[in-house]
Amino acid sequence: MSFSLPKEWQEWVSLLLGVWLCVSPWALHFTDDTAATNNAFSVGFFMIMAEVLTISGFAVLEELIDIAIGTWLVVSVWLLGISTLAAKIDLIVSGLVVLLFAFYEIWSNRRAASTRS
């Protein structure tokens, strides 16, 4: 495992989304909702670490991690019983964006691999 800055624009978006999730409880004023705040901050921090700590040769694993993160963000709203509307919207939209980029990168990597063959 090594430290590196993101190389592709999708990775930069994921990094910025991780930063957003870390600050969103304060920016959107839902710090009173402890479950939502802890969830947003923890997942955001994990996303930042996932983008700057590169596991060489495991691009597919990284995308599967992003799919798990995006899915968690969406379903955590119900599983954690998050009641604050701003938190619900933040976590669901952020999760959908993470999923969108993960599936885009998988599709893009497969497309690039098929054109090389």
Image (spheres, rainbow, N blue to C red):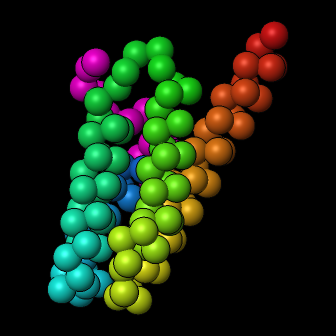
Is residue 23 rendered magenta in the image?
Answer: no
Q: Locate residue 70, reporting x and y percent.
A: 49, 55
Residue 86 lies left or right of residue 57; in this view the side is: left
Position of residue 62 relative to residue 116, above or below, is: below
* Quarter location, residue 115: top right
Residue 2 lies left or right of residue 83; in this view the side is: left
Q: Residue at 73% across / 19% down in the picture?
A: 113
Q: Locate residue 37, reporting x and y percent.
A: 23, 72
Give the residue furthest to the top: 117
Q: Residue at 54% across / 46% down in the picture?
A: 67
Q: Locate residue 2, reporting x and y percent.
A: 26, 20
* Quarter location, residue 108: top right
Of the pair 78 and 99, the residue shown nearer to us: 78
Q: Residue at 73% across / 27% down in the picture?
A: 110
For the image, the number of numbered tags is 0
Q: Residue at 43% across / 80% down in the picture?
A: 88
Task: Check the picture and name the quadrant holding the C terminus.
Answer: top right
Position of residue 101 relative to residue 64, above or below, is: below
Give the extent of the magenta segment. Answer: 1-13
Task: Check the picture and name the quadrant holding the N terminus.
Answer: top left
Residue 88 lies left or right of residue 48; in this view the side is: right
Q: Is residue 91 visible?
A: no
Position of residue 63 relative to residue 82, above or below, is: above
Residue 22 lies left or right of residue 51; in this view the side is: left
Position of residue 3 relative to residue 36, above or below, is: above
Q: Is residue 56 visible?
A: yes
